[in-house]
């Protein structure tokens, strides 16, 4: 992840997945992007359906990812294996942002998503000084993602019943939050 000085922030550790970093995702990552974006397992809880073409991915990266104020690739040895982003809100709600993340299925259950969330939370509040609250909505049927947020220090606030329609089905969502004033164990 780039901080204000432009340096990349990396995770530490002794396992094979210790070289986790966050950086801007760009067009050169399109083939790696397709690994998770075309995977039905990965996109099950995403708002979009699996991508079916490289052109569709290029269009998304060009028109959504690149202009996005905070969209990063989750990288292992600088190769994109997922993505993490914070979406800002309108002026009256600019004190909060919504966190989202996705990871290629072959990297699930290895602590990588938790590490990526911790890397992001280590700097997002200083990079975005207006941000006081980072929140994440997780489908009640996605306990693995709920555990990621809990391990990263987020507080489970409650279940929002029948909160949104996802792929034609009304879903209950769990709200998690992390405040700028919360202590964070990195």
Image: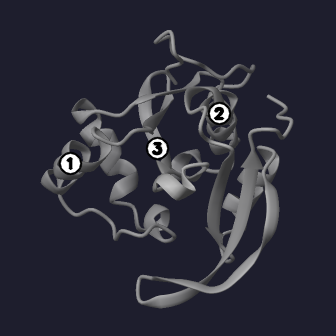
Tell me if residue 104 can be seen: no
Residue nearer the viewer, 105 or 95: 95
Mark earlier in primary sequence (3, 2): 3
Q: Where is residue 66 in the image (x, y as percent from the top left)?
A: 28, 38
Q: Quadrant of the C terminus?
A: top right
- Give the residue at mark 3: 83
Instruction: Please give the name of the residue rendered at 49% of the width and 45% of the height, measured from the top-left corner.
Output: 85
Q: Decide: marks 1, 2 in contact (CB < 8 A)?
A: no
Instruction: Please give the name of the residue rendered at 65% of the width and 56% of the height, measured from the top-left corner.
Output: 135
Looking at the rendered structure, the secondary structure element under dot 1 is helix
Q: Position of residue 141 (x, y in %)?
A: 66, 77
Side of 185 relative to 130 (left or right): right
Hey, which residue is sitting farthest front in the picture?
Answer: 92
- Give the residue at mark 1: 63
Mark earlier in primary sequence (3, 1): 1
Query: Which of the 4 image quadrants contains residue 174?
Result: bottom right
How busy is the neighbourhood of tag 2: few (under 14 within 10 Å), some, or many (20 plus)?
Answer: some
Instruction: Please give the name of the residue rendered at 70% of the width and 19% of the height, measured from the top-left corner.
Output: 12
Q: What colour-coding does the image apply?
A: one colour
Instruction: Please give the name of the residue rendered at 41% of the width and 28% of the height, measured from the top-left corner.
Output: 79
Q: Position of residue 163 (x, y in %)?
A: 59, 83
- Give the residue at mark 2: 125
Looking at the rendered structure, the secondary structure element under dot 3 is strand
Mark toward the viewer: 1 or 2 = 2
Q: What separation in Å lies between label 3 and label 2 (alpha carbons)?
A: 19 Å
How busy is the neighbourhood of tag 3: few (under 14 within 10 Å), some, or many (20 plus)?
Answer: many
């Amino acid at each position: 992840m780039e901080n204000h000085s432009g340096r990349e922030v990396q995770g530490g550790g002794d396992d094979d997945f210790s070289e986790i970093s966050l950086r801007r995702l760009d067009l050169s990552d399109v083939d790696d992007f397709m690994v998770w974006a075309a995977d039905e397992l990965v996109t099950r809880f995403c708002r979009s359906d699996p991508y079916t073409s490289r052109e569709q991915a290029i269009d998304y990266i060009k028109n959504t990812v690149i202009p996005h104020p905070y969209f990063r690739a989750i990288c292992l040895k600088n190769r994109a294996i997922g993505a993490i982003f914070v979406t800002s809100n309108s002026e009256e709600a600019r004190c909060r942002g919504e966190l989202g993340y996705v990871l290629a299925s072959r990297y699930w259950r290895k602590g990588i998503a938790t590490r990526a969330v911790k890397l992001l939370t280590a700097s997002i509040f200083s990079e975005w000084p207006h941000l006081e609250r980072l929140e994440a909505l997780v489908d009640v049927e996605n306990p693995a993602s709920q555990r990621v947020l809990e391990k990263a220090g987020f507080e489970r606030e409650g279940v929002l019943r029948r909160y949104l329609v996802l792929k034609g089905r009304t879903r209950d969502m769990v709200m998690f939050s992390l405040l700028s004033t919360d202590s964070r164990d990195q």
